[in-house]
Image (spheres, rainbow, N blue to C red):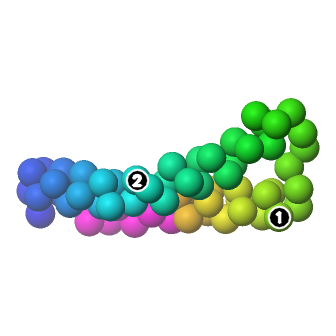
């Protein structure tokens, strides 16, 4: 694939994922904004989001 095709695909994927990404960011930042420790569920969700993001970044490098 050439750079243009990869770039267009990446931008389209980000545009489609934006609402989900924003919602995930809000959930991750909630304990910080509220000045409290995250619950066990929030920790698990944050770790899952990090794992998924890492997986997506690594797979994007294999295009």
Label for residue 23? none
Figure quadrant of residue 51: bottom right
First-in-chain label (1 vs 2):
2
Percent from the top left, x then y, of residue 50?
62, 56
| Residue of label 1 | 41
Q: Who's the residue at 82% across and 37% down the image?
A: 34
Q: Quadrant of the N terminus?
A: bottom left
Picture quarter containing residue 5? bottom left
Is residue 36 shown above or below 21? above
Residue 7 as seen in the image, left or right of residue 48 = left
Could you classify mark 2 by the number of other residues whose Cα lies within 10 Å: few (under 14), some (14-19), or many (20 or more)? few
Q: Nearer the viewer, residue 51 or 11?
A: 11
Q: Residue 30 appears at what percent x and percent y? A: 74, 44
Residue occupying the point 62% across, 60% down = 49
Residue 14, by quadrant, is bottom left
Please tell me how crowded label 1 is: few (under 14), some (14-19), or many (20+) other residues with Cα within 10 Å.
few
Give the dominant element type of the magenta stretch: helix, strand or loop. helix
Q: Looking at the figure, which quarter contains the C terminus?
A: bottom left
Q: In this view, does 24 lie to the left or right of 27?
A: left
Asked if the residue under mark 2 is in contact with the one under mark 1, i.e. CB atoms within 8 Å, the reply is no
| Residue 33 seen in the current view | yes
Instruction: Name the secondary structure under disc 2.
Output: helix
Residue 60 in magenta stretch: yes
Residue at screen point 49% across, 54% down: 21
Task: State the CA–CA distance, disc 1 to disc 2.
Answer: 23 Å
Say whether residue 47 is magenta. Answer: no
Q: Is residue 10 visible?
A: no
Give the residue number, with chain letter if any, for mark 2. 18
Identify the magenta region. 55-63
Left or right: 61 in relation to 12: right
Q: Label 1's element?
A: helix
């Amino acid at each position: 694939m050439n750079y243009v095709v990869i770039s267009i695909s990446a931008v389209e994927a980000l545009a489609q994922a934006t609402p989900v990404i924003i919602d995930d960011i809000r959930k991750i930042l909630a304990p910080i904004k509220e000045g409290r420790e995250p619950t066990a569920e929030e920790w698990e969700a944050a770790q899952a989001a990090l794992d998924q993001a890492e997986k997506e970044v690594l797979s994007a490098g294999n295009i």
